[in-house]
Amino acid sequence: MAVLSPLTFNSLNLFPGLVHGVFSRTEGYSKGPFLGLNVGLSTGDDPDIVNRNRALMLSSIGLTRVLFLNQVHGTDIAVIKSEKDAADAVWKGQGTAPSKIFKADAAVTNLKGLGLAIQVADCQAVVLYDPDKEVIANVHSGWRGSAANIISRCIDTMVTQFGCSPASIRAGISPSLGPCCAQFINYKQEFPKALWQYKEKDRPYFDFWQISRDQLGAHGVLDEHIETMGLCTRCRTDLFYSFRANKATGRFAAVIALKI
Ligand SMILES: [Zn+2]
C-alpha cells in the first residue's frame, strides 16, 4: 500500500508545528460501495478493514493517536485540556478501541500529538488553528451544523476556554456538498431565515461554503485566514464519499494535530 498523500490547506502548511490532511478515498483497503479509505465504523463496512484504513491514515502523517467523535449533527464540543480528558477516548491503532467516545460534533485541544478527526460524506469538516496560543479544533458542520452555527460555538470555546483571539485563527473548509449540488427543497422548514439569503435566485440550491466563511467572519476570523478546498463531494465520488450520491457509502476524514 502506498503512503497516502492527503490534500492539505496551503495556508496551514506555513506552520511547521502543525500536521493536517484531508484524506481522499483513492487509497485504502475497503471494497464495494466503501471502496478506498473508508474510516467510518458505522457505515456497514467491515470494522477490521476500517481500522486498517484508520491506521494507514494516521501513520501517513506520523500520528499514533487520534480522537474520533460520535457525530450526531448536534452542537456539543469535546474540550480536551489534559491527558486525563482524552485518555479513554483516544483511538491508538488497529486492535485497540477506546472505552468511551465523545458524543460531539467538534473537538478542541492544546495537547501535542493528539489528532482530531472529523468524518464526513458531504458535510464539512472545518479545521481551525490558532498559531499564537497553539490551539486546534475540528468541526463537523453539515446543514444542521450550519443552521445551528456550530462554527461560532467552537470559536467561542477557543476564546473562552483557551484564550484564543479570533483574528489569529486560521480556518480550512474541507471538500463537501458544493453549491452545484446542495439542493434543499424543504429549506423553509429546515433552515433559519438567516440562511435563506444563500439560496440561488431561481432554484433551492445553497452555498454552504459561503455560509461557513460568513459564520467564521462574523466571529472575527479574517477573510484572508479562511481557505476553502472548493471540491464538491457529490461531483467527485472518484475522490470522496458522498451520501447524496450513494446512500451506502463510506466516510473520509480531515485530521489536524499539533506536532510533539
Ligand atoms: Zn456538485
Image: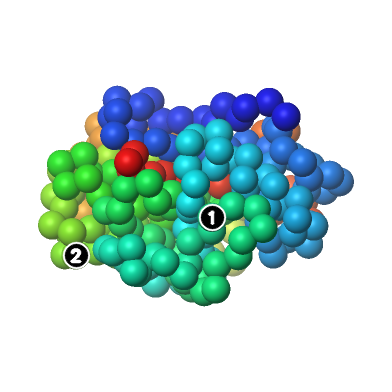
- The answer, for residue 88, to whether it is visible in the render is yes
Q: Which mark is residue 201?
A: none
Which image quarter is the C terminus in? Answer: top left
Identify the residue shown where x is 48% and y is 36%: 62
Q: Which residue is mark 2?
A: 161
Which image quarter is the N terminus in? Answer: top right
Amino acid type shown at disc 2:
Gln
Does the Cβ of the disc 1 residue fall within 8 Å of ligand 1? no
Q: Position of residue 181 (x, y in %)?
A: 62, 44
Q: Position of residue 55 (x, y in %)?
A: 62, 45
In depth, the one of 88 and 50 nearer the eye is 88
Q: Position of residue 209 (x, y in %)?
A: 44, 44
Local packing at callout 1 (Cα closer than 10 Å; few below 14, some 14-19, many 20+) is some
Identify the residue shown where x is 57% and y is 27%: 5
The secondary structure type at the circle numbered 1 is: loop
Q: How is the image coloured?
A: rainbow
Q: Which mark is residue 92?
A: 1
Amino acid type shown at disc 1:
Lys
Tag 1 or tag 2, which sits nearer the N-term? 1
- The answer, for residue 232, to whether it is visible in the render is no
- Asked if 247 appears above or below 86 in the picture, the reply is above
Q: Position of residue 105 (x, y in %)?
A: 45, 64
Identify the residue shown where x is 48% and y is 51%: 65
